[in-house]
Image (tube, helix red, strand yellow):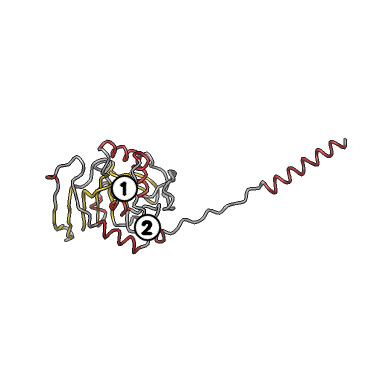
Amino acid sequence: MKSKRIYKLLVAVFLAATCVFGMATPVLASPSPAPEDVFPEEEVTDLWDSALQQDVVPDKGSVNDLRMTVNSTESTNSINSTTSGVYPTRKGEILVTTDPYMGSVPSGHAAIVYDREQVVESLQDGVQFGTNHWDDKYTLTIGLTVNSTTLAQDAAAAEWCAGQRGKPYNYNFFDVETRDRFYCSQLVWASFHDLYGIDLNTWVFGQAIHPAELVLSDQTRTVYTHAR
């Protein structure tokens, strides 16, 4: 009988210790840094200044006579527009703009072309298809191609991005390794990084990747610009 009482006492002590020491202590997630702290305005402005000085060259698979420079005035609203190159409609080309989209990454947005009508992009409500009519949406559009990939590899990168649809927006711009959520330029970067080991990041902001860095990466070249 005595041994039973001792056994029950030991069990009670063990359970009490488990409740006290094994109880999970809530850990408050540290807030994601503000976009303007990750991408300081002055540095972003300098990046865009450099990005806009890049020469426009033919896309892979194109020939020199496809290059064109057009200066025109849109009669409907008298907006002067300048275009150089051929608008990206090939699957796997990259689109970048200086315009912010819905207050996410400041001063910039990026997407990958899926076809003539669609891009894959990450907006505030997550990864999704968007319209491939950026000249109508943004004041400046830049088209890019990755130097070392084939046309088939570019298409596979776009398909990889399409496979991430439905995942939420990533507000932690430094956490580019997560594949549970994406911000716009992280999504484009991750497709070429994961499939081919190509790093489009210039590391100006550490691991965080601003859309302008996709233009300035030595792994890409500019194939199109449109400004209005």
Q: Residues within 10 Å of mark 1 (few under 14, many from 20)?
A: many
Task: Report the front residue among 127 and 50.
Answer: 50
Q: How many marks?
A: 2
Where is residue 204? Give x, y as percent. 36, 56
The quadrant of the rendering that contains the N terminus is top right
Q: Is residue 58 left or right of residue 36?
A: left
Q: Residue at x 79, y 41 (%)?
A: 10
Q: Is residue 25 left or right of residue 6?
A: left
Task: Report the front residue among 192 and 18.
Answer: 192
Q: Residue at x 16, y 61 (%)?
A: 78
The quadrant of the rendering that contains the C terminus is bottom left
Q: Is residue 80 above or below residue 116?
A: below
Q: Residue furthest left?
A: 65
Q: Secondary structure at mark 2?
A: loop
Q: Residues within 10 Å of mark 2 (few under 14, many from 20)?
A: few
Q: Residue furthest bottom?
A: 42
Residue that carries the numbered disc 1 in the rendered image = 111
Q: Secondary structure at mark 1?
A: strand
Residue that carries the numbered disc 2 in the rendered image = 103
Residue 19: image tag = none
Where is residue 25? Give x, y as percent. 62, 51
Q: Is residue 127 left or right of residue 59?
A: right
Q: Amino acid at mark 2?
A: Gly
Of the image marks 2 and 1, the number of the one nearer the N terminus: 2
- Among the 4 quarters of the image, the one containing residue 205: bottom left
Q: Residue at x 55, y 54 (%)?
A: 28
